[in-house]
Each structure stands twice: as C-alpha cells, then as structure tokens.
Amino acid sequence: MTERLTTEIETTKKGLDTLEADLAACFVFQGDKEATGIARRELRSSLSRLMAEERFEGRRGEYVLWYTDGAYPSRRYAVIGFGKRKNFNPGALRDAVAQAVHRAEAVSARSMALSFPPGAGAGLSPRDRTQAVVEGVLLGNYKFDKYFNEPHKKARPLERVTIVTDAPPAAAREGIRRGLISSAATCVARDLVCEPAGVLTPTEMARRAQGLAKQAGIECRILEKKDLERLGMGAFLGVNAGSAEPPKLIHLIYKPKGRAKKRVALVGKGITFDSGGLNLKPTGHIETMKCDMAGSAAVLATLLALPELKAPVEVHGFMAMTENMPGGRAQKPGDVVRTMKGKTVEVNNTDAEGRLVLCDALAYAQQHQPDAIIDLATLTGACVVALGPLASGVMGNDRRLSDQILKAADVAGEKMWPLPLYEEYSDMLQSDIADLKNTGERWGGALTAGLFLQEFVDEKTPWAHIDIAGPAFMEREVPLDRKGGTGAAVRTLLRYLTDGI
Ligand code: BES
Ligand code: MN
Ligand code: ZN
C-alpha cells in the first residue's frame, strides 16, 4: 500500500542551513523573534530582518519566504508560524507541516528540508513526533487527480523530504515507517470517498475491497443480497429497496501471527450515495452525498494497514454497502421493517438510513463475539451542528473504550469529542406501531441516532459509535485536507489498534 507514496523521506541531525533543498522551512511559535535550528548567523539575521519587515508574528499558517540566490545551500528559506505555544498539539504540528508542503507546491519545489524549534514535539515520543511530521508531509501533498487531463492539474508529489531531528535513528526510522503506512491508508480512504457515486457502487466497492485485501494479505468475504435475506436483515434491505444496485455486506478479517490480545469489530456505514430516499434531500444538501460511505472506507483502509503494522489484535471489518435511492420499489415513510435482531422499526424518515443499515451490520458483527465494537458513520447533520465540520462525535456504552479512542485521536491529531447517550432521550424513538422508529425529534439528533444504534449491541459488549459526518468530507480546504474525502478516523483507529488497547 505504501508504494503509492513516492516521496523519499529521511532524517538527519545536521542543521537546516547545511542542507540542500528547493525549500528549507523552519517553524516558529507565535512571538518568537528568531528562527531556530540555523547555526549561521548571517542567514539567521537575514530571516529575522525579513520577519520583522513583513510583520510576521508566527500565527498559525503565517509564513515568510526568502530567495537566497545561491548564497546558501538551499534555494529558498521559509519561516512558518506554529501559532501560540500553549495551543500547540499533535494536530497543529501536522497542520503546520502540511502548510509548509503547500508553500513548496506553490513554488514548484521538488525537495524540502524541515526543522523545528524546541517544544515542537507536542508531547509526543521521538517516534510519534517523526510519524506526525511524515503524515503532515504526505497528507498535505495528497490530491485526487485521476479525472484531470491538464498536466498542470495533476499531483506532483515531492521527491525528497529531509527532517532535521534529534530523535534516535531507530525511533526516527520507525516513525517514518509508521507515518508512511498510516498516510497510505488514509489516502486509500480519501480516494474511495472522492470517487463519484456513479463509479463507486456497492458492487465496485466490493470488487476493490477484494483486490486490495488480497494484496494486503487479509481475508475478504462478500455477503450478497440473498445472504442478507437469509440473515433477515430487513432494515438493511429496506434501504436498498429503492436502488437499482444490489447491496453488499463486506466482511474483512485480519488475524495477527501470534495469539491475539483481543478481537475487535469495526463497522462502517457504506451508503455510496444518499439521496435521502423518498424523503429526498433538497439542493444544497444532496451534492456531496457520495461521501456517505466514508465510514466503510475508513474500515477498509484501516484493515489493509494492520498486517504491515503487525497489530496485536484480531480485527473484523464490516462494510454495509448500499445506495439510498427513491426508486419505484423504495421503502416508504411509515413502512415497518424487521431487523436481523428481531426488533421492528417504523421508518418515519427514509433519510435516516444510516442507522438502518448499521443496526443489521452491528447485529451481524455481534455474532462474531468481539470484545469491542466500534462503528464509524457519516450519520447525522446534527453532529456537525454540535461540533462543527472538523470534529467527530464519540458516543457509546463504555467509558474506558471511549477514553481509549479519544486518547488515540489526540495522538493521531484528529479532533474527536465525547457526546452523551442520555437514556431519557430514547423516549423520542418510541413508535405507535413498532418497537422503535428510526428518527426522534429535531433536537439532539446525533444522540438519538446513537441511542438507536445502542439498541442493537449487547450491553455487555463495549461499544463506541463515531459520528464522522463533519470531518469525513471537507467543503473548504484546511491544511491537512483538500476539498473532498479526508480519510477521517483512519489514523485514530490505527493508533488505537496498535498501541491503544
Ligand atoms: N448522511 C446523512 C448525514 C450527513 C449530513 C452526512 C451531512 C454528512 C454531512 C444522514 O443519512 C442523514 O440524512 N441524516 C439526517 C437524519 C435525520 C433525517 C434524522 C440528517 O442529519 O438530517
Ligand atoms: Mn440520509
Ligand atoms: Zn446518510
């Protein structure tokens, strides 16, 4: 999987001013007057003068760029702002590095050298710090370009990046290796989310999953429509009813070489296009709904990386794939479906389809007797209202599991925040004619969605639900993510599965 990333990355203990690169970037905290890591006084003072002249303050994303005209080994030197020292964290480190990469792209640089001030470790170990920098480089450099013809619109990955670091060589090497793997996995998810829904149908997703699983050395089983019928997945099939494309339930299995510490199930929402069904989405809400399979893409991308990372746990991935369409056979508001678990659900809104496919996928995952279940879904607009477009909401029935995920997210530099599943709100899901209805009232929509899912997991099994509706797909560019699919939750899951259990 890492072969797709062609940038050569190395570390060195040499000073930035001795390295040869098209762009040499050093980072400073807000308020710092001088660029650190540069031994040569003349170079340092030239940069300081420029910083003062351009009223550079070291704010997040701020930069100055100096052309050396051959006076120093690198063609250009940049100073890039980290923002306030007290707000600094592993995410900010990745963002700043990605910003440096964007500067390099803007001037067509092919090679880069990077140097950091003391305190830029963001509380990470030397290995994890190196990994963070590598992710900043590779994720900042990503572009989904397969549909462009014009050469200038094609991605041009950097050829070489040199990271100045005092990390011990073994730690640096392992950080680079992990950074490459997690970035490649993230980009697999990004590619899938960016792919138009007309191309990436459930059948095409199954085909790609099979090919990628084979390459990675993990098992891949595909459950067809008739299998879902046999299993009694009435809720999943109800969502599929209005679509001309058959559904697929993709089951991926990774087993570690030795004895597994635990068995974890990952369950992903895989709506390859969410039109809303007969509760059709209006203009302004429907255009980006190819992104509604981002949970399933994160599951696939994560599983593909586990063999290389030698994760110590057995992991089962379940991807619940279907379109949500308003065809002639579509389910109708007011219909009642029978779930695999036996509970009946009144579908009062066909646009709350994610929980309908997930409830059957969760029940199926549960049958494999996992020690923990984590589901990932672009589930509710309400979660985006609550936390904004950059953060995922984490809910569940087990404090320890949620805490482990939140901690992994911090180290991975992803924004995740806990949301509560108050029992009182489950009253909103009472139906007049079935065991449950699929939507509650207007308020607390992220929570009632979570409460609905909770009905389908065994209360003795630790379970977490991550609503990635905000960060899975960017509508404006942020440092680490271009517009489009982001690969949200992949890095967090990898961190959790390798070091967080
Ligand atoms: N896929 C959407 C949620 C979504 C919204 C994802 C924005 C990404 C960005 C989900 O299926 C949906 O339509 N949810 C409804 C639920 C409502 C009908 C209870 C929503 O959030 O409006
Ligand atoms: Mn929907
Ligand atoms: Zn949806």
Image (spheres, grey):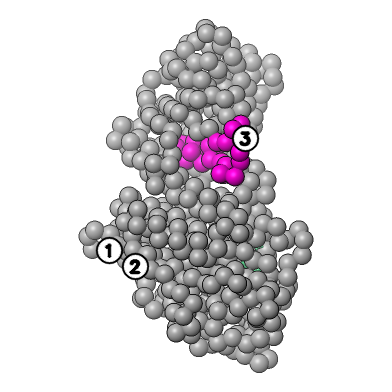
Which residue is pictured at 44% across the width and 84% down the height? 230
Which residue corresponds to mark 3? 150
- Asked which secondary structure carries label 1, the reply is loop
Task: Give the alpha-carbon distance from disc 3 to disc 1, as whole Å.
Answer: 49 Å
Which residue is pictured at 39% across the width and 41% down the height? 3
The answer to whether the residue labelled 2 contacts the one labelled 1, judged by CB atoms less than 8 Å apart, is: yes
Task: Give the alpha-carbon distance from disc 2 to disc 1, as whole Å.
Answer: 7 Å
Q: Quadrant of residue 387?
A: bottom right
Number of labels in the image equals: 3
Q: Quadrant of residue 468?
A: bottom right
In the drawing, does residue 211 fall left or right of residue 397? left
Residue range in magenta is 133-155
Q: Quadrant of residue 370?
A: bottom left
At label 3, the amino acid type is Glu
In the drawing, does residue 310 fall left or right of residue 301? left
Query: Residue 260 shows which numbered tag?
Result: 1
Q: Quick one: label 2 or label 3, which is nearer the N terminus? A: 3
In the drawing, does residue 301 fall left or right of residue 246? left
Tell me if residue 389 comes above or below residue 202 in the rendering: above
In the drawing, does residue 177 fall left or right of residue 63? left
Q: Is residue 71 visible?
A: yes
Q: Quick one: label 3 or label 1, which is nearer the N terminus? A: 3
Which residue corresponds to mark 2? 263
Which residue is pictured at 53% across the width and 40% down the height? 142
At label 2, the amino acid type is Arg
